[in-house]
Structure formats: C-alpha cells, structure tokens
Image (cartoon, rainbow, N blue to C red):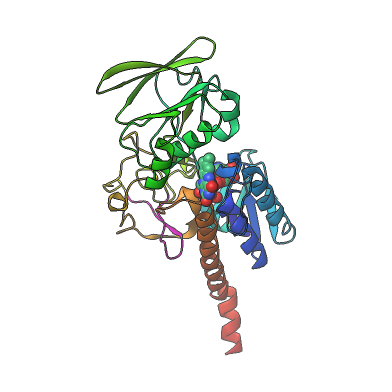
Amino acid sequence: MYDLAIVGGGPAGVSAGVYAARKRLKTILITDDWGGQSNVSPEVQNWIGEKSITGLDLARKLREHVEVYAGEWLTIRSPHRAMSIKEIDGGIEITCSDGKSHEAQTLLIASGSNRRKLEIPGAKEYDQKGLTYCASCDGPLFADQDVAVVGGGNAAFETAMQLLAYCKSVTLLARNDFRADELTVEKVLKNPKLKAFKNVTMLAIEGEKFVTGLRYKDASGETLLPVTGIFVEIGLIPNTEWLGDIVAKNKYRQIIVDPWTQRAFLPRAGSGPDARLGESGSRGVVDTTMSETQGPRNEADGLLPASRIWAAGDCTNGKYHQNNIASGDAVKALEDIYAFIHMEKNHSPAVEEKAAIVV
Ligand SMILES: Cc1cc2nc3c(=O)[nH]c(=O)nc-3n(C[C@H](O)[C@H](O)[C@H](O)COP(=O)(O)OP(=O)(O)OC[C@H]3O[C@@H](n4cnc5c(N)ncnc54)[C@H](O)[C@@H]3O)c2cc1C
C-alpha cells in the first residue's frame, strides 16, 4: 500500500508530487496529462519565478520537475485516468481506466476543472467547426474574420483581448452583467474593433458546413450575428464526478475543504443552500468571478473531516483559482498529510507494542 496517492498532473498535483517524494512518502501520482488547464495559454505571466512562459513550456517544466523524483519514492502513472475510489481498511483504493487498482493510506485529489459547454441548438453540431472553447489553441485560425465571444467573466474578456489582436471584429455577448475585473473590462471595451452586449440569451448556432452565425436575443429583440468563429468562456466544471459520494461537495461539485489544512469532509445527506449561482444559473457550474459578498463562507459547517482525503487546486471550493494558489494549496495539504501519516505510524499497534516493551 502506498502512503499517498495523488490524482492530477496540474500545478497542484505536481507540487504535491515533488513535496511527497522529498518527504519520502511512498507515493503514486496518477494523471491524464501534464500542466493542467493553462497548458493551452500562449503566455502565462504570473507563474512566480518566470516573467513569461507559454502554457506548454510550463507543462513541460512541471513534468520534468516531478519526474526527477520518479523512482523509489514516487511512482508516476501517466497518461492514466482515475475512474473511481472506495474506502478500504486503513486506506483508499483507486481504480484506473486500465482496470488496475492502487491502494494508498491517504489521497490528495488535484483533478482540477474543465470548461463548461454551451448547450443551445447547433452547439454540438458545430463544435470544432467554428465553435471552440480555446482561443489560445484555435484563435489564429480566425484571423481577419468576424468572431463572437460568449461569456462575461475574466476568461471571456481575456479571450476577447487575445482575439482583437488579429480578428476583424469581436462581439462579446454576456448572459448577465460583465463580471471581469474593472481594468480588463475598461481596456477591452476601448478597442474600436469590439462590441459588447450584456443581458443576452444565446438561442442557436447557425451554419452550413461551418458556423455562419450566432442567434441571440436581448431587450431589443432577436439578432442573427454573422460570425464564422464562436469562442465560449462560460465557466468551469470541477473534475470531481469520478469521486462519487466519498467526500462532501458543494452545489458546483467543488470539494469542500478545510482551508487551514486542505482536508476534505465527509458528505452529508442533502446539500445546504449556497448563495452563488453560475453564469448559467444552473447546478455544477462555477462562476469564478462572483463578488466576495456572494461567495459561500461556511460550506463546511457541521461537516465531519474525512480521515484520509485531502484536495487542492481548482477542484476545491477555494474562493480563488490560479496556478500559484493550486500549487500552494497542494503544499499545504502535503504538510498535513505528512503529519497525519507520521502520527498514524507512531500510533500503530506495532509501534505502541514496541513502546510498551521499552517502558
Ligand atoms: C485558458 C486558461 C488560462 C489560464 N491562465 C492562467 C494564468 O495565466 N495564470 C494563472 O495563475 N492561472 C491561469 N489559469 C488558471 C489555472 O490554469 C488553474 O487555476 C490551474 O491550472 C489549476 O491547477 P490544478 O492543478 O488545480 O488543476 P488543473 O490545472 O485543472 O489540472 C488537473 C489535472 O488533473 C488531471 N485529471 C483530471 N481528472 C483526472 C482523473 N480522473 N484521473 C487522472 N487525472 C485527472 C488533468 O489531466 C490535469 O492534469 C488559466 C486557466 C485557463 C483555462
């Protein structure tokens, strides 16, 4: 049995892997891929220690760093997907996509988030035929074309900013108000190639072989916007479905953690009310741009800590989600896991028996 299993190869999972190996915890790190969500970013400027780095380089560096420790203390399984977990005597069993199971005394969940998909007629049909969820990956294909960005948070405004550099025009359509930080909104709205509308309901994507337009309605009525590219930035869905009900989650499917230690909690029947709503107003969608007053404060009230499970990064209910935060949260979790494992070892029947003999 491993001391620790880590699921995820983004900044949280990798940071945990490095710390675990250096603390000589017998660890298995299971991940689908490396680098996490920002590996599609053309430029990350706030990863501390790097003035500027592409997402792909960041992913490569994270991978190279953790691979230095692969060996006696750290086993890496990648590409590998954790499909389910269950509690076993003295630990957790994780079953992966290849059907194999791994047992560990403790688990750190660092499985991050994924983008939420647009659910209107035509969205499935034109996915990757003009409709895309990654401006960094696909944006340049739409150079000199008219495009739309759907969403009103930071991600949407940053996407618009990126596209404005080479697209003919960008129309930003937000379901509610603009929720990006004021500086970004101000900067983007100043660009003469940009039009932005709020309180818009997206109705359908139209096209032939590829997208030709986006139909929406607002207070002035229904409009068919002629665009060849549609970039969607409407929130994140935490990658926590594979966990079933083993830990408590909030209504956005984020794992509720103790911010002091990153320890997860046991679920309770029926989740409590939560003041936030995602941009879509539907369950399970994280709107990372809601104001502080609307954020959940006491989601852990009345919950009991899970004895062997911790979580870090974008899969948790932490208020802010960034690379550095994911990394720091994972390190915090690791310190606590290390303390837990050593306390458990020191109190195991064998150790207690030995101590009794010494006395
Ligand atoms: C386009 C974009 C640009 C961004 N730019 C920045 C930026 O400039 N600066 C910044 O600080 N933040 C940025 N962010 C946010 C940042 O990327 C996230 O906060 C960060 O990646 C979270 O790290 P994480 O390790 O918690 O999760 P993730 O990065 O989501 O990584 C999760 C990992 O878990 C793996 N995984 C998921 N499920 C399973 C499973 N069941 N089994 C095995 N493996 C699994 C995934 O493959 C992945 O490796 C950006 C996000 C996006 C989408």
Q: Which image quadrant shows ligand 1? A: top right
Residue 15: x and y, percent? 60, 58
Q: Is residue 158 above or below residue 263?
A: above
Q: Is residue 336 above or below residue 320?
A: below
Q: Quadrant of residue 223?
A: top left
The range drawn in magenta is: 255-268
Q: How many marks?
A: 0
Majority secondary structure in the magenta region: loop
Does residue 96 appear in the picture of this structure?
A: no
Q: Position of 154 compared to 291: left or right? A: right
Residue 271: x and y, percent? 30, 47
Residue most extreme to the bottom: 359
User: Toward the viewer: 344 or 192?
Assistant: 192
Q: Is residue 256 magenta?
A: yes
Residue 13: x and y, percent? 58, 53
Question: Residue drawn 31% across and 41% down?
Answer: 277
Question: Residue drawn 69% across and 47% down?
Answer: 60
* Quadrant of the drawing holding the C terminus: bottom right
